[in-house]
């Protein structure tokens, strides 16, 4: 057990996310919307209850990403954790400065399992603090970490499955009316910017440094 803890003690860094989660709970309890997030495109997007499945799978997807990278590569783990931490801090700051919400949720009349799950989500999760969507940003963080993982790359169709999960989760946020298309767009932009700073730019610097240090006569 001591050997296991010593080897994987980096998992304790996930505890740094707890203050951010408490901050979110505080915002959920205290924020009164002053702005409504809405786009006319939202009215063209249908309500499809079955998409509650990928919406809920998000929790397992993100957890899987952290656990998998943590078991196989500290570098991949730290990059994913950094991605998520910055994303959460940035998003919660936006929520605090611009308290907002959405009025897209329909009245749930169906009694099928998917509709009941959505009804439960509506009852336990407020329609505030939605832009940018953390479902979108942290899905990008997870897919990025798995995509850059050497161990995960060896799994047949692993990257494809992760990419499809990312797409379905992003779709689910608007198809069960938890988010406006604006929230998704803001999440995509935020996620791509973080991807550039956490993955693309450092890797370009590493390649540049390698080329400078390389000599054909060595």
Image: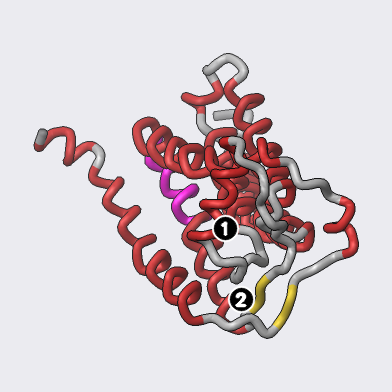
Q: Split into 4 quadrants, where in the image is the C terminus?
A: top right
Residue 120 counted in the magenta span: no
Q: In the picture provided, is 110 more to the left or to the right than 92?
A: right
* Residue 202 in view in this figure: no
Instruction: Give percent across and percent down for residue 16.
Output: 34, 61
- In the picture of the structure, the residue carrying the numbered disc 2 is 94
Picture quadrant of residue 214: top right
Q: How is the protein colored in the picture?
A: secondary structure
Q: Is residue 39 left or right of residue 31?
A: right
Q: Read off the magenta span.
A: 73-83
Q: Quadrant of the N terminus?
A: top left
- Counting the numbered discs, the total is 2
> Which residue, as the protein is rendered here, is positioned at the far top?
156
Q: Can residue 110 be seen at all in this image of the molecule?
A: yes
In which quarter of the view is residue 139 placed?
top right
Q: Secondary structure at mark 2?
A: helix
Q: Between residue 138 and residue 44, name the one nearer to us.
A: 44
């Amino acid at each position: 057990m001591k050997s296991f803890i010593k080897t994987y003690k980096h998992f304790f860094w996930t505890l740094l996310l707890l203050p951010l989660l408490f901050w979110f709970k505080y915002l959920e309890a205290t924020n009164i919307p002053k702005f409504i997030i809405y786009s006319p495109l939202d009215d063209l997007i249908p309500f499809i209850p079955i998409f509650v499945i990928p919406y809920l799978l998000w929790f397992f997807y993100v957890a899987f990403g952290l656990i998998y990278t943590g078991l196989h590569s500290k570098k991949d783990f730290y990059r994913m954790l950094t991605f998520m931490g910055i994303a959460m801090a940035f998003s919660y700051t936006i929520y605090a400065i611009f308290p907002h919400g959405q009025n897209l949720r329909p009245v749930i009349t169906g009694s099928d399992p998917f509709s009941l799950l959505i009804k439960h989500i509506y009852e336990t999760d407020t329609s505030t603090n939605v832009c940018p969507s953390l479902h979108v940003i942290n899905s990008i963080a997870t897919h990025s970490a798995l995509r850059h993982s050497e161990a995960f790359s060896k799994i047949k169709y692993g990257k494809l499955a992760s990419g499809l999960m990312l797409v379905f989760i992003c779709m689910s946020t608007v198809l069960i009316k938890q988010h406006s298309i604006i929230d998704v767009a803001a999440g995509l932009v935020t996620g791509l910017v973080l991807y550039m700073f956490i993955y693309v730019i450092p890797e370009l610097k590493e390649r540049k440094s390698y080329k400078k240090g390389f000599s054909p006569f060595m």
